[in-house]
Amino acid sequence: MNKTESYFTTYFLLGLLICITLSSCDFSISTSSPYEGVWSSIGYGRILKIEEDNFLLADVTDISCEKTLSGSLSEFENYGISSDTLWIKDAINIYQFTKIDDAPIHCKKGQALSDPHDLMHNFEVLSSTFEDHYAYFEERNIDWPKTYERYKSQMKDVDSAPQLYNLIDNMLSTFDDGHITLSAPDSIVSLAQELIIDKTTDSNPTNLKKYSRFEVADAVAEHYFKTIQSRKSGLIKWGILDGNIGYLQLNQMMGFADYIPNDTLDVYDYWRKYFEIGESKSSIEHGISELKGFNSIIKEAMSDLSKTSSIIIDLRFNSGGKDELGLALLEYFNSNEQVVFCKFAVAGTDFTPKNCIKLKSKPEYYDRPVSLLISDASASATEILVLAGKSLNNITTIGGTTNGVFSDMLDKTLPNGWEFSLSNEIYHDLQGNSYEGKGIEPQIIIEHHHNKDVLLNQIMNHIKSEGDPAIDWVLAQKQ
């Protein structure tokens, strides 16, 4: 489960729409407040209308305008106007808008440029979004003009929604980017799958046993501990190894809000119930609850491990979640507040201003050695933790290269209601390096494989026979 582009764009304020469409609002309002009016985002492809304390947000391209969110401006975490630029802060993200006279004409009622279910129109909206906002054509070896023309030429044979789904899905699969997604109604997806002629593709050609990352994480913990502290159905575990070495296993960067009192649920039942409850919360409420729950648990864990001579933080089975949780953990190992990385987004032929992220420090930070275990399964928000950790002198990375998907997922909606996402942000370390598509290589290479099934089998086989090579390497340094 990878991080999404903060809840500002996905689940924020599922309240009543203040307008049926952008056009049903009167754009020639008299502005009694500097916030009132129509604003165009710098990057991200959005139009924001504010009237009194209400806002309406829409995704726009040159040929489309799709309303996405609405609610009360006062419910944002932090916002303001500086040098005629409206900024909205959400977790570590800062979104900026400039005021415009009016929304584009195709945002007006009855002025849509095409039938929302027109197949070619939907293809063009998605393509236009990628052209304006995708950040990694070069890194992913995508010749976008050729790719676009290739699949556009195939549209002449597309005469149904399932066929369109397959064509777009095929096009997006060429990127090999874990933050690119396409979502359509189950009925469309089922019909699309029926149209696929070759259904013999074997995603596991070596006939390896299918282990889940949680299953392997459990096996690692059980090998080294008779009893171990565990919270949130195993999302986080900790204990003390031989040699007074602390061990902290963090298996997700989300799922820590105190929604479910029963901590003994199977991890999959836990997630099912967790999402059922989480979907009823506003994004702000949910984000606050996530961080509060995580901070409570990590404070307990670090208290238990505070007297150890060193700590192993195992992130090899962590596929991501929320950046701020990983940064909250790193605060315990940081001596002084400092900038640890910068991020910015593609904005057409330009970029948004850099947003450089500061890592805070705990008064009694842990100043002894930290071994950060990583692998190809360490992805997304987990990689942001690893990226930020590069600035901390007491951290050594061990294991395999991370997955290489850093950007938040920019969520968009097609005119026909389908949803998709893409990578539009660039993360840099303090030397200006980007690791998208290649991942962060560990300082100590122990074991690595880009096929997740092979990787999990390797770790599981080692556990069954002799032990975990990465953990045993750390233990051996203390002998």
Image: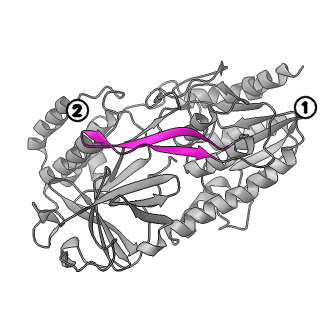
Residue carrying label 1 = 242
40 relative position to 411: left or right: left
Residue 144 magenta-highlighted: no
Three-letter amino acid code of the residue under disc 1: Asp
25 relative position to 451: left or right: left
Three-letter amino acid code of the residue under disc 2: Trp
Disc 2: CA contacts within 10 A as few (<14), some (14-19) or many (>=20): some
Task: Give the number of the disc on residue 144.
Answer: 2
Helix or strand or loop: what does disc 2 sit on?
Answer: helix
Helix or strand or loop: what does disc 1 sit on?
Answer: loop
Task: Give the number of the disc on residue 439.
Answer: none
The one nearer the camera, 24 or 433, is: 433
Secondary structure mainly formed by the magenta segment: strand
357 relative position to 314: left or right: left
Q: Position of residue 200 (x, y in %)?
A: 36, 33
The one nearer the camera, 324 or 137, is: 324
The one nearer the camera, 396 or 336, is: 336
Instruction: Name the colour scheme.
Output: one colour
216 relative position to 74: left or right: right
The answer to whether residue 441 is visible is: yes
* Residue pictured at 62% horizontal, 60% vertical: 290
The answer to whether residue 210 is visible is: no
Q: Quadrant of residue 464?
A: top right
* Residue pictured at 33% horizontal, 76% vertical: 33
Q: Position of residue 168 (x, y in %)?
A: 25, 43
The one nearer the camera, 99 or 113, is: 99
Query: Which residue range is magenta in the image?
Result: 337-359
Residue 350 magenta-highlighted: yes
* Residue pictured at 14% horizontal, 34% vertical: 149
Task: Determine whether label 1 and label 2 are within 8 Å by CB.
Answer: no
Disc 1: CA contacts within 10 A as few (<14), some (14-19) or many (>=20): few
Disc 1 to disc 2, C-alpha distance: 53 Å
